[in-house]
Each structure stands twice: as C-alpha cells, then as structure tokens.
C-alpha cells in the first residue's frame, strides 16, 4: 500500500471516529439524549411580556418528543398565553399538565424545566400561582344601569385543577339592572378585563354564601353556578322543586353578597 493510500485511509478513519464521538456525545448531552444522562439543556432567558426567548448551549435546530430544556427565568409571567421561542425555531405554546400557565407560575430568578410533547412545551415545575385580585359586579340579563357599590373586591388562585375564589360586595343602589341575577368576576377595577381562566372549563362548585338584602322563600338556599351558555357565574336559589335564578325583584336596593368557593374540573 502506497504512502498516499495509507494517509487517505487514516484521514477517512479519523473523520469516521470524530463523527462517532460526536454522535455519542449528543446522545449523552444533546437535546435528544438517552439512557438517563440528559438532565435538560441549559438555556438563557430573555424576551418581553409572556414571550420567553431561550438561547440554548447547542443551537437547537429541531425538536423531538421528550426533549428537555432548563432555564432561569428573567421575568414573571402575567395574564395571557405563554410562548417559548427556542433558538431560531418558531414560537411554541407553553402549558402545564393541568392546563394553562396562569400568571405568576413563572417567576424571575427561578429555575424551570420544560418538556416538548410533540405539540407544545409542558412546564414541569410551575411555581404556585400568586393570589390574584377580583372585582365582582352584579348584573342582569338585560343591563340598563349599574348598581352603586360600597365595595366590590376579592381574590382567586388556581392550583392544579382547583380554582379557589373569594369575593364580597355591598351595594346601596341597584340602578336599573333587570333580569336574572348574575355575578361577573373581573381582574381590574373598571371591571372590563375578564378572568384569565375560563369558567366553563370548571364543571363543579362548592362553597359558602353569605348575603343580606336578598329575599328567599321558606326552604330555599342560595348558591352559585356556572352558566352553561356563557362564562358567567350566576347566583342560584334552590329548593326541592329545583334551581332558579333570582331576579331584581328578589333584591333590596341595599344589600351584601359574599362567597368563598372552589371550582373543580
């Protein structure tokens, strides 16, 4: 074998060895790591709002189901959908196994792991949601006016499949609201921004009401229920004959309503 042939063979063998070593290292430390070595590719975090722009150590160009990435968050998420943009890939939704990533589940300076499931990223270790402020209001099926509130406030918090909420309101004038009595829950004092969760996602409610200024007949009890046709929480009156919705005629021009409850799916 000539010297030139030996050198060419050596170069070919070296290239093959380098390729094999690279493949093994990717299986141990890369985005598609196997055999339990992979603990998450570390990424830096940037971006604005609920957009998390992650830059990995290896410049990921494709994703495979089961890929895990770890990052230290640069900010706390707010109300709304959360998106992950990894390296130069398109943005992908981030959720939890239980559903949405609610505000405060990602906090500045905390370490988070996310897993790609083939469709979206799943946040494995969300922080507990911070209690969020509520501003409830009364309204009817056909609102013609606005009750005057002495106060109307509360809070809610989602933990897994459970939604805890508490609110209280007092009014000294009902205005000209008419129709079946409902309670709208909002996240700003102007009561124009609805809750970040969708009430219709939650099918059951348990809780304890307190009220003044609402007339109930003998044997009736006050409760609350999610309206099947819209995302409202409605006050209900129940007795042995069934469930109805009290209208304005059952309310006095001054009254109170407080409720502590849990929705669950």
Image: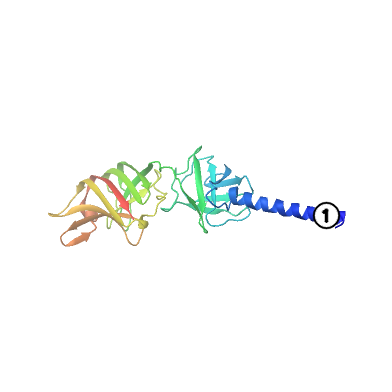
Q: Nearer the viewer, residue 111 or 165?
A: 111
Q: Nearer the viewer, residue 42 or 161?
A: 42
Q: Nearer the viewer, residue 245 or 120?
A: 120
Q: Which residue is mark 1?
A: 6
Q: Is any part of residue 231 visible from this angle?
A: no
User: x and y percent of residue 200 in the render?
Assistant: 36, 58
Query: Could you tell me which residue is drawn at 21 percent across and 52 percent down?
Result: 222
Q: Is residue 42 above or below residue 7?
A: above
Corner quadrant of residue 190: top left
Q: Nearer the viewer, residue 131 or 219?
A: 131
Total numbered circles: 1
Q: Is residue 258 above or below residue 200?
A: above
- For disc 1, the neighbor class at 10 Å (few under 14, some 14 to 19, many from 20) is few
Query: Could you tell me which residue is drawn at 54 percent across and 43 percent down?
Result: 71
Corner quadrant of residue 70: top right
User: x and y percent of residue 16 in the render?
Assistant: 72, 55
User: x and y percent of residue 78 in the render?
Assistant: 47, 44
User: x and y percent of residue 251 in the render?
Assistant: 22, 50
Which residue is outermost to the front?
A: 1
Quadrant of image for the C terminus: bottom left
Horizontal side of 74 relative to 232 (left or right) equals right
Horizontal side of 87 relative to 121 (left or right) equals right
Which residue is outermost to the top?
A: 109
Q: Is residue 197 above or below residue 72?
A: below
Horizontal side of 218 relative to 127 (left or right) equals left
Quadrant of image for the N terminus: bottom right
Q: Is any part of residue 216 visible from this angle?
A: yes
């Amino acid at each position: 074998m000539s010297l030139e042939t030996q050198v060419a063979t050596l170069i070919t063998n070296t290239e093959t060895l380098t390729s094999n070593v690279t493949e093994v290292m990717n299986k141990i430390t890369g985005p598609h790591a196997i055999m339990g070595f992979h603990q998450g590719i570390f990424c830096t975090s940037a971006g604005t709002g609920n957009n998390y722009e992650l830059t990995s150590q290896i410049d990921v160009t494709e994703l495979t189901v089961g890929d895990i990435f770890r990052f230290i968050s640069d900010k706390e998420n707010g109300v709304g959908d959360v998106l992950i943009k990894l390296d130069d890939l398109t943005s992908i939704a981030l959720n939890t196994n239980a559903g949405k990533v609610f505000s405060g589940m990602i906090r500045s300076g905390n370490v988070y792991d996310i897993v790609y499931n083939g469709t979206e990223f799943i946040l494995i270790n969300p922080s507990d949601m911070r209690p969020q402020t509520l501003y409830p209001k009364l309204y009817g099926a056909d609102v013609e006016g606005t009750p005057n509130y002495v106060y109307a406030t509360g809070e809610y918090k989602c933990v897994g499949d459970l939604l805890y909420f508490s609110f209280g309101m007092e009014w000294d004038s009902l205005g000209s609201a008419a129709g079946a009595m409902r309670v709208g829950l909002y996240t700003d004092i102007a009561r124009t921004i609805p809750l970040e969760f969708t009430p219709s996602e939650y099918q059951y409610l348990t809780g304890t009401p307190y009220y003044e200024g609402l007339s109930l007949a003998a044997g009736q009890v006050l409760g609350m229920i999610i309206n099947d046709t819209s995302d409202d929480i409605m006050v209900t009156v129940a007795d042995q004959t069934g469930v109805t919705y009290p209208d304005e005629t059952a309310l006095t021009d001054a009254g109170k309503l407080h409720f502590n409850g849990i929705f669950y799916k």
